[in-house]
Each structure stands twice: as structure tokens, then as C-alpha cells.
């Protein structure tokens, strides 16, 4: 079958093609290969009909060629074309040999033995029916640069105009979805050569069916014989560098020269398949047939070229050996990755060391640098009462790291690497950026959020930074000391995250971790992210707590320190002790705690002394009681943001003040506090891990603050309480100055005893604070301290102005109008008992109605307000109901 008589006429050929399920097109006989219809676009979707074939190719029709539209319209048929010059170059034989070696030989022979056509230019056309996938569009698979003897006059003129232009010859391509190709018996002037298309094998009814995945592998093999030079991508190749002084060799350059591709690819699971000349063919991990990549195919340099996805390499991008090594071993091909790879190769003795004059540093003064953190020495644990004469043992930090900041990008990456490897002492991060912990003149811990200048000064102290400049004397390089640029510091501060240990809070005494273990070493505690900055020297504790040490601790705290305070009831003493233990167990049970209100009947009762105990033991931050809620919010944010004291107090509220603030209600029910920083447009979120304390005479609460308050009441019951004497410990402040460390040890011992006893809790309902209240109840039960929250119901009414006022009103209402629903106007007849406006006036019926709606269903003692809609009068009536039934 090698002449133009093999198919009698175009009409018969069109019938044969149509019967095989193919879409036929007429082709102009002018050498243009253009379709001879007004528009052939509809035939990409709809197959031509026999009637159209009769019109195009019947008797009397002008000479035309035939073509097949490929893709879905012809039953998912695709054409694979080898150009005439590819056949002459032996490319078909080379591809066949590679197909056999790659495990695709059976399918490839089926294609070669199927419907095969020779084009007038000597090329080969093979057809495949793709199963299980779609046919891609027309695709150029392999090309090469044209040889000078192949240039057309037009191409020669183009080169004269643009000498660097590339003249390309496509060698293998496909005709797929949306494309068509000429078929036999097209002849005569249909092709520019005047030669016919000849059938070499098979026919339309012998097109082989190939699985789509296998066909993808076949196309990949065809792509691999492409010889068109491809430029290296900056993303997959280190940038070109000038030669090193004195003929030195860089690690990457040395690696390129001394390493074989098998040493790079085979350890990663790649398999060598075959070799054609300089070209080696490889199969990626996970594949059992087909090919995935070539090496040695380019003429100028031995590069890896991957043709498939699903590997670490980017498809159809050339990789040098150094780039491939960098990607596989360091996760990328950015500049920083190449630097890491070069350093690793240098450690493996690749490359030569360029001459460089090193930085001369002044020897450090004052001995080794310490980051200020410490650890307890487990080999020496004195008695409970012993306090170490010297400070805690210091953890020595290695010599300051050195960093080349010649390039700003490298400087940023290097500084972040130094942060990540823990070489910077006392530098931590919060949500808004890096910070450090320091203390003010009174020894109070503070947190400093770093700005550009702070960070630059810090780095100048803790990192030796230098630039590498050209050294004319050695023709190498030298290091020159330079500080980090401010814009570099600004860029680092502008990040969303920093590779630093998170600072989640400051503690000033040992605390219990969530797992029940104890934080007792000053400095940073990695499991919790807490930084211990002791207010007083921390005593070494015995490994095991004994009943005797717990008894002694109770005597120190209750029998001495708190012995002479005129608590109103046992509950007040228990609630103060519970608040005093809260900073120790706060990390153990994260979440909100109620505010502590220390109130007394008169001045000189000891409420300020109780407040000051927090300061002596833990450290105390104080802020004046603000004039309004806006100022209160600013004060709260400022204290949470900067100070590290675990207790914050607002001392000496006005006599008889009613604490009724939605800001305080929100504060003591939130684990985190969010607000805008004063003088800034940025908002911050800060953990609310502090104990909030209010003090004042005859304090009362209103609104939601009542159930969010832990009351500690004092009543000396004498005319001049400040004249009292004969206290157990004498002057308490002087005693605390001498014994604060002892008090801390006693409080910690109490908690340790409870933990050792099984950390039993006593189920206690207190709204948002139930878990905290249950733990404190458990500790106090273990310590046999009675009264915890025993006054809660009485305090809820007696110390809550609103609750007391409405309780009196509902009681009077229930007695005066017990059995029926009434209007607000009728309720106003209870003149002496109706709640009043702020100025003391009685409310209007409408105002009273609003108040009743706001309190509908809420119990005041055992009475509640019930709304009774009157649909006839279209108004609300009201009645009072007792718990358990109507009254």
C-alpha cells in the first residue's frame, strides 16, 4: 500500500472514514491545507454527514483533499506526527528504542502497526484512540534548531535582521481536540509539493485503542527527544557568580564536576532506564513503566529535565546538579537554600576556601554572658526554712553569634535563623512582636515591646554583625563590623510571626503547671511559656511535702500573718486565702477569676494591709479608680500590656461606692482582653491572667458585678480601729519585709500538699468561675479552712444595692397585691417601696414598665416578676410569683 491507487476516489475514502466513526472535512486544492468550507468550527462538535460528503466529493465536484477532525467528535482519536526531517534524523528509531526500554514497547508497536500514513514531505502520521480520558489539543512535543542548509529565503532574511533569532523546526507534534490533519488519497495540488499522502499500514478501522494514562507516558517519551535549548530558570539554578580569586572553586561548581546524576537521583528512588548517546533516561519513584526525566540531553551542560508532575522537581524546567541537590536536601531553590547547600557541600570537602580576612573582635569583659535564667540544683536541697545565700545558678550562654549582613535579605534570614536556634537571651514574642522582660527601679517586672531602635540596640549587644567587602590587599574579602540597618529591624518587626519562644505571662512565685508539676526555677519555663521573675528569694523545696510542713505553713499564713484581721465571718477569711492562693494555681486552671472586693466598715480596719500582702508576696500593680468607663478601659489595657505583676489593685474607692461597671464585668469574665493601645491605631489581645482587687469602705455592687465579685469583709467593731495593738506578729509590714519568702514557701507548700493528696476538688457552682471555685474549695477543704463561699447568698443581696432594692419592692408587692396581675400605674401606689431614679424621684409608669421587662423572670431572693399580656387592652400586666408556685 504505497501508491495513490490504494483508495479509488475521495468519495469512497470519505465513506470509509465515516464508517470508522471519523469526522471528514474537504481541503482546498491550493496547497494551503485549509478547509474548503465557509467555517469548519461546527465540525469540531458535529460529525459531517454522508450527504455532505456527496456534495463535497461526488461527481462533478471540484478536486479536493480529505482531512479528519481529531478529538471527541471522531471518537477520541488523536494523531501523532513525525515530520519528514525527524524521520531523516532517525528520531523515529530513537523513540522506538526508548519506548521498548521504558516498558511501553507493546503499545508503541500497536501504534506503529495501526493506521499509518506517509505525508508528501516524508513524515509519518499515526492515529490512536484514547480511552479513559480526554484528547488534549494540538501539542508540539519535540523540536530542534534548524540547520543552516534548511533555512528558507525568508528565514535567512530574518536572521540578517535579527542575528540572535532562533529558527525552529518542530519534529514531533500531535493533532488533537480542535485540530485536523490531511489523509490519503489527498494528492496533486492539495499539498504544496504536489505529492500525495500514502497509506503505509492499516486503515481507519485498525486504529489502536490506548489507555489515556499510557498515552500520557508515550507523549512524555516523545517530549524527551526535544533538543531545543532551554534557559535555566532563576528559581532552579544558583545565580552566576564571578570566578573566585586565585582560581578558587565554589562548592556548587566542584559538586557539578565531581558528581554523577546517579548519586543524586537513585538515593531518592529514581530508576535509570536506558541511554541514547549522551542522553540518559530516568523513571520517577512510584512508576513501573514509562519515563519521567532525562539528563545529558542538552549540548551545553548536563542538566536534569523532568517531564512529569508528581515529583519534587518543577516539570519542564532544567536543573543543574547543584540545583537538584539543593532542592532534594534543603526543600527549595531560593537563594537561602543554595547558601545552605553550599555550606553543607563545603563541609563535605567540596570547593576551595576563598581567602578572607576575619573580623578582629575585642575580648569580652566581665566573664561569660548569662541570660539571667536559672535552674534549681537537685543535688543540694536544704531544709524548708533555708534560703540560699547566693543567687540562683546561671545558665551560661555560648559566645555571641556572628552574622554576615552584607546583603539585607541574607541579614534578615540570618537573624531569624539566630532567633530560631535560641542564641538570643531573654528575647521572646507576644502577639504583637518581639519583647523582653526587665524590671523597674522598685524591682517590679515589666514587659518591653520592641520598636526598631530597641531591636537594633539589642542586636548590637548580642550579635556580632559584619559586612564582607573586597580586600584589595589579598584580592579576596574582609569582614568589617557594621550594625544592623534600621530598615532591616523594621522589616523583622513587620512580620506576622517570629521564631522566638512565646511569652505567655510573668510569674513572681512558683506556680502549678497544667500537668500538676511545679514551676520553681527563675527564668523562662518552656512548657508553659511563663517567665518567673521572683519578687522575693525563692526557697528550695523538699522533694516530698509532709503533713508537718503543711501544718507549719498553715500556722505561718493563718496563725500569724492573718491572725489579727477582723474578718466578719469565717467565709471572709476563707475567701481571702483563696484569692491569695490563686496566682499559684492560675496556670493550672486557665480561665477567668472573679474580682476580689476587700471592704470594711471604717477606715483603719486593715483592708489596705490585706491588699499590700499581695504586693509583698507576689508584687502588686496599682491604678487609681477612674472617673468613667472609658478611662477604666485605658487603665486596664495599660496595666495588662506593660506590667508583669500578677495582682492589680484599685485602692480606696469612694466611701459607699456602688461598683456597677460593664467594663469590669467584661474584664473578669474574659480569658483575653482586647483593646486599642493608647496613642496607637493597632489593637492588641492580651491574656487576662491577673487577679483584680478593689478596696474601699462599705463597697456595694450593682448590675452583673454582684455575681462576679468575691467579697472579703472586715469589721473591727471598735471606735478607733487604727489604734489597735498587741498583734501576733507586731508590725505586719515589717514582718512581711523579713518573712515574705517564708510566706511564699508556705503558700506553695499548701498547694503542694493538696496536689500530693490527689488534687481533690469540691464541686462548687459559681457561673463562669465554677472550675476555679471548685479547685479552691478542694484546697481549702484539704487545709480544713471552713467558710468558702458560705456568705454567697447573703452577699448577693446584702452587698448588691440593686438586688436589695428590688427584693424589698417585690416583697412589699407580694404582700399588698398577692393574687392578681396589675398595671404599672397601680404598682406606683407602693410609694415607699418602688425603686427610684438616680435623683430619688419615682419613675413614670412607662419607665417602671421598662424596668420590669428588663428583670422579667429574674429571682430576687425567692420572688420573680411575671409578665401577663392583656390582648384585650393591648397592654402588659404584671404579677409577682414565688419560687415553686404562684403567690
Image: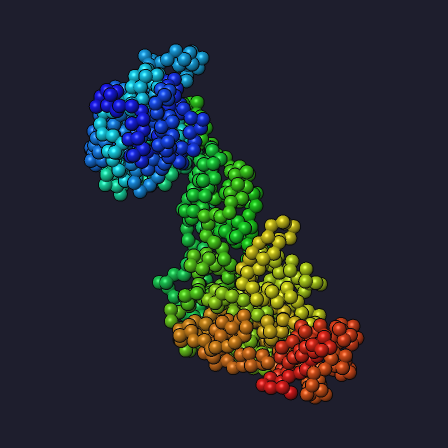
**Coordinates of residue 781 in the picture (x, y in percent):** 47, 79
In the image, taking residue 99 as reference, residue 786 lies left or right, namely: right
> In the rendered image, is residue 526 in sight?
yes
Residue in the foreground of this view, choosing between 422 and 438 = 422
Q: Is residue 636 above or below residue 593?
A: above
Residue at screen point 53% across, 41% down: 491
Q: Is residue 685 above or below residue 451?
A: below
Residue at screen point 40% across, 24% down: 36
Residue in the foreground of this view, choosing between 653 and 637 = 637
Q: Is residue 124 above or below residue 270?
A: above
Query: Within the image, what quadrant is residue 347 found in?
Result: top left
**Coordinates of residue 531 in the picture (x, y in percent):** 48, 58
In the image, taking residue 404 as reference, residue 624 lies left or right, namely: right
Q: How many marks?
A: 0
**How are the residues colored?**
rainbow
Identify the image quadrant of the N terminus. Answer: top left
In the image, taking residue 523 as reference, residue 78 lies left or right, namely: left
Residue at screen point 45% across, 43% down: 416
In the image, taking residue 69 as reference, residue 442 lies left or right, namely: right
> In the rendered image, is residue 245 in sight?
no
**Coordinates of residue 318 in the picture (x, y in percent):** 34, 30
**Coordinates of residue 379 in the picture (x, y in percent):** 35, 63
Identify the image quadrant of the C terminus. Answer: bottom right
Query: Within the image, what quadrant is residue 858 found in?
Result: bottom right
Residue at screen point 29% across, 23% down: 9
Q: Is residue 731 above or below residue 456?
A: below
Amino acid at each position: 500500500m504505497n501508491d495513490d491507487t490504494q483508495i479509488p476516489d475521495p468519495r469512497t475514502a470519505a465513506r470509509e472514514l465515516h464508517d470508522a466513526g471519523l469526522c471528514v472535512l474537504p481541503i482546498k486544492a491550493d496547497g494551503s491545507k485549509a478547509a474548503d468550507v465557509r467555517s469548519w468550527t461546527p465540525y469540531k462538535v458535529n460529525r459531517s454527514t454522508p450527504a455532505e460528503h456527496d456534495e463535497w466529493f461526488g461527481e462533478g465536484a471540484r478536486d479536493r483533499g480529505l482531512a479528519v477532525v481529531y478529538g471527541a467528535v471522531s471518537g477520541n482519536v488523536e494523531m501523532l506526527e513525525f515530520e519528514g526531517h525527524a524521520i531523516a534524523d532517525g528520531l523515529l528509531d530513537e523513540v522506538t528504542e526508548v519506548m521498548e526500554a521504558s516498558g511501553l514497547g507493546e503499545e508503541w508497536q500497536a501504534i506503529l502497526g495501526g493506521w499509518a500514513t506517509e505525508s508528501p514531505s516524508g513524515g509519518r502520521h499515526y492515529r490512536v484512540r484514547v480511552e479513559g480520558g480526554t484528547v488534549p489539543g494540538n501539542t508540539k512535543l519535540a523540536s530542534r534548531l534548524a540547520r543552516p542548509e534548511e533555512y528558507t529565503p525568508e528565514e535567512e532574511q530574518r536572521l540578517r535582521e535579527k542575528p540572535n533569532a532562533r529558527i525552529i523546526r518542530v519534529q514531533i507534534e500531535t493533532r488533537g481536540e480542535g485540530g485536523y490533519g490531511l489523509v490519503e488519497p489527498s494528492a496533486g495540488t492539495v499539498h504544496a509539493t504536489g505529492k500525495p499522502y500514502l497509506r503505509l499500514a492499516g486503515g481507519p478501522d485498525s486504529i489502536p485503542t490506548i489507555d489515556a494514562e499510557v498515552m500520557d507516558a508515550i507523549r512524555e517519551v516523545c517530549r524527551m527527544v526535544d533538543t531545543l535549548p532551554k534557559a535555566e530558570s532563576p528559581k532552579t539554578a544558583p545565580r552566576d557568580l564571578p570566578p573566585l580569586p586565585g582560581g578558587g572553586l565554589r562548592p556548587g561548581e566542584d559538586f557539578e564536576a565531581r558528581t554523577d546524576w546517579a548519586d543524586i537521583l537513585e538515593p531518592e528512588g529514581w530508576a535509570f532506564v536506558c541511554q541514547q548517546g549522551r542522553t540518559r533516561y530516568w523513571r520517577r519513584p512510584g512508576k513501573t513503566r514509562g519515563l519521567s526525566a532525562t539528563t545529558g540531553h542538552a549540548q551545553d551542560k548536563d542538566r536534569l529535565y523532568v517531564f512529569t508532575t508528581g515529583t519534587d522537581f518543577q516539570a519542564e524546567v532544567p536543573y543543574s546538579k547543584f540545583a537538584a541537590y539543593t532542592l532534594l536536601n534543603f526543600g527549595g531553590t531560593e537563594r537561602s537554600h543554595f547558601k545552605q547547600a553550599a555550606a553543607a557541600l563545603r563541609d563535605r570537602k567540596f570547593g576551595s576556601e576563598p581567602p578572607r580576612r576575619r573580623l578582629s573582635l575585642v575580648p569580652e569583659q566581665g566573664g561569660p554572658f548569662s541570660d539571667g535564667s536559672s535552674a534549681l540544683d537537685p543535688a543540694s536541697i536544704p531544709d524548708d526554712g533555708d534560703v540560699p545565700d547566693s543567687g540562683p545558678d546561671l545558665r551560661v550562654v555560648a559566645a555571641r553569634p556572628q552574622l554576615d549582613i552584607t546583603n539585607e535579605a541574607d541579614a534578615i534570614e540570618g537573624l531569624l535563623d539566630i532567633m530560631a536556634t535560641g542564641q538570643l537571651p531573654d528575647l521572646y514574642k507576644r502577639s504583637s512582636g518581639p519583647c523582653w522582660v526587665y524590671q523597674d527601679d522598685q524591682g517590679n517586672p515589666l514587659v518591653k515591646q520592641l520598636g526598631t531602635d530597641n531591636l537594633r540596640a539589642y542586636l548590637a549587644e548580642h550579635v556580632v554583625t559584619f559586612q564582607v567587602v573586597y580586600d584589595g590587599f589579598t584580592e579576596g574579602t574582609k569582614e568589617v563590623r557594621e550594625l544592623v540597618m534600621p530598615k532591616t529591624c523594621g522589616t523583622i518587626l513587620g512580620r506576622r510571626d517570629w521564631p522566638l519562644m512565646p511569652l505567655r505571662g510573668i510569674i513572681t512565685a512558683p506556680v502549678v503547671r497544667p500537668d500538676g508539676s511545679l514551676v520553681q526555677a527563675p527564668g523562662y519555663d518552656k512548657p508553659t511559656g511563663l517567665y518567673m521573675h521572683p519578687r522575693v528569694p525563692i526557697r528550695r523545696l523538699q522533694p516530698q511535702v509532709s503533713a508537718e510542713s503543711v501544718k507549719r505553713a498553715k500556722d505561718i499564713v493563718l496563725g500569724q500573718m492573718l491572725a489579727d484581721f477582723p474578718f466578719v465571718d469565717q467565709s471572709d477569711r476563707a475567701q481571702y486565702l483563696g484569692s491569695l492562693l490563686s496566682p499559684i494555681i492560675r496556670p493550672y486552671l486557665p480561665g477567668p477569676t472573679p474580682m476580689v472586693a476587700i471592704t470594711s466598715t471604717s477606715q483603719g480596719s486593715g483592708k489596705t494591709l490585706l491588699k499590700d500582702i499581695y504586693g509583698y508576696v507576689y508584687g502588686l500593680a496599682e491604678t487609681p479608680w477612674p472617673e468613667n468607663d472609658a478611662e477604666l478601659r485605658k487603665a486596664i489595657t495599660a496595666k495588662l500590656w506593660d506590667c508583669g505583676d500578677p495582682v492589680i489593685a484599685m485602692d480606696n474607692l469612694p466611701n459607699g461606692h456602688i461598683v456597677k461597671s460593664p467594663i469590669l464585668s467584661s474584664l473578669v469574665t474574659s480569658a483575653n482582653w482586647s483593646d486599642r493601645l493608647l496613642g496607637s491605631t493597632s489593637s492588641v489581645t492580651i491574656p487576662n491572667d491577673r487577679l483584680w482587687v478593689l478596696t474601699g469602705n462599705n463597697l456595694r455592687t450593682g448590675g452583673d458585678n454582684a455575681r462576679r465579685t468575691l467579697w472579703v469583709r472586715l469589721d473591727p467593731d471598735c471606735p478607733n480601729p487604727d489604734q489597735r495593738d498587741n498583734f501576733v506578729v507586731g508590725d505586719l509590714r515589717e514582718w512581711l519585709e523579713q518573712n515574705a519568702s517564708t510566706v511564699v514557701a508556705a503558700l506553695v507548700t499548701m498547694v503542694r500538699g493538696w496536689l500530693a493528696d490527689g488534687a481533690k476538688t469540691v464541686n462548687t457552682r459559681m457561673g463562669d468561675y465554677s472550675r476555679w471555685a471548685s479547685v479552691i474549695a478542694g484546697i481549702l477543704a484539704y487545709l480544713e479552712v471552713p467558710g468558702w463561699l458560705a456568705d454567697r447568698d447573703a452577699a448577693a443581696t446584702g452587698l448588691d444595692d440593686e438586688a436589695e432594692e428590688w427584693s424589698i419592692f417585690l416583697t412589699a408587692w407580694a404582700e399588698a397585691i398577692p393574687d392578681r396581675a396589675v398595671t404599672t400605674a397601680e404598682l406606683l401606689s407602693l410609694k415607699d417601696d418602688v425603686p427610684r431614679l438616680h435623683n430619688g424621684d419615682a419613675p413614670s409608669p412607662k419607665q417602671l414598665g421598662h424596668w420590669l421587662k428588663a428583670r422579667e423572670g429574674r429571682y430576687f431572693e425567692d420572688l420573680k416578676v411575671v409578665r401577663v399580656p392583656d390582648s384585650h387592652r393591648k397592654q402588659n400586666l404584671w404579677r409577682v410569683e414565688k419560687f415553686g408556685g404562684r403567690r
